[in-house]
Amino acid sequence: MMSKFTLSIRYAIVISGLLISYFLIISLFGWHTNPLFSLFNGVITGFGIYEVIKGYKLREKEAFTYAKGFTTGIVTGFIATLLFTLFFGIYAGNINPEFTDSFMGPWGSSTSLGIILFTVAIGGFATTAVFTLSFMQLFKKSWNTTKSESTPQIRSEEVADLKK
């Protein structure tokens, strides 16, 4: 029997793996200290959240609800954020301790690793919330009613008569 979070955990591992790979690739070129390159993290996270909600909806079919889809997106993004933040802490604290100074260099100040990790985590959580809320607008069941034969239709002539 699969846990209800198995799909979320699988996608979170893939998302965090892609985020870590992207970070390491841009670090090869020395671009990892430029905050503009972190914008692509949103693309990676957004794609992963979209795919996990889509996959969950396909798996659940008629049992899919807004709450279940929302929970799937949030759990996936939060786990991916925690995994990436853990990697980032190991990288900035042990692998490349000078990273925090070079990262904060353009602002002319130095800050603690804890503050940077907190900022990375909050950014990931916010990105997750925004993308999950946005994508659930695409996946939720519509409340729009369909026109049926039993629904009375008002003709334009009747509307004109009502205005008199």
Image (spheres, helix red, strand yellow):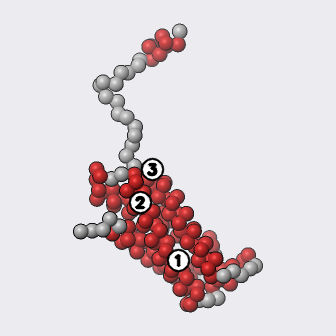
Q: Which residue is mark 3?
A: 137
Residue type (three-letter) at the residue carrying disc 3: Gln
Asked if disc 3 and disc 1 are in contact, CB closer than 8 Å, the reply is no
Residue visible at 39% across and 43% down in the picture:
142
Q: Which residue is mark 1?
A: 85
User: Is the residue marked by circle 2 packed among few (<14), some (14-19), or many (20+) residues within 10 Å?
Assistant: some
Dividing the picture into quadrants, the one containing residue 154 is: top left
Q: Which residue is mark 2?
A: 71
The residue sitting at the left extreme is 1
Residue visible at 53% across and 68% down in the picture:
124
Residue visible at 57% across and 68% down in the picture:
123
Q: Is residue 28 visible?
A: no
Residue at disc 3, secondary structure: helix
Q: Which mark is residue 76?
A: none
Foreground pick, 95 / 75: 75
Image coordinates for residue 68, horizontal then vertical, percent: 37, 56
Foreground pick, 149 / 120: 120
Asked if disc 1 and disc 2 are in contact, CB closer than 8 Å, the reply is no
Asked if 90 appears above or below 70 in the picture, the reply is below
How far apart in space, not on screen, are marks 3 and 2 (Cα)? 14 Å
Image coordinates for residue 71, horizontal then vertical, percent: 41, 60
Residue at disc 1, secondary structure: helix
Image coordinates for residue 152, horizontal then vertical, percent: 36, 21
Asked if 118 appears above or below 90 in the picture, the reply is above
How far apart in space, not on screen, are marks 1 and 2 (Cα)? 21 Å
Foreground pick, 160 / 130: 130
User: Is the residue marked by circle 3 packed among few (<14), some (14-19), or many (20+) residues within 10 Å?
Assistant: few
Q: Earlier in the sequence, mark 1 or mark 2?
A: 2
Quadrant housing the N terminus: bottom left
In the image: residue 22, left or right of residue 119: left
Residue type (three-letter) at the residue carrying disc 2: Thr
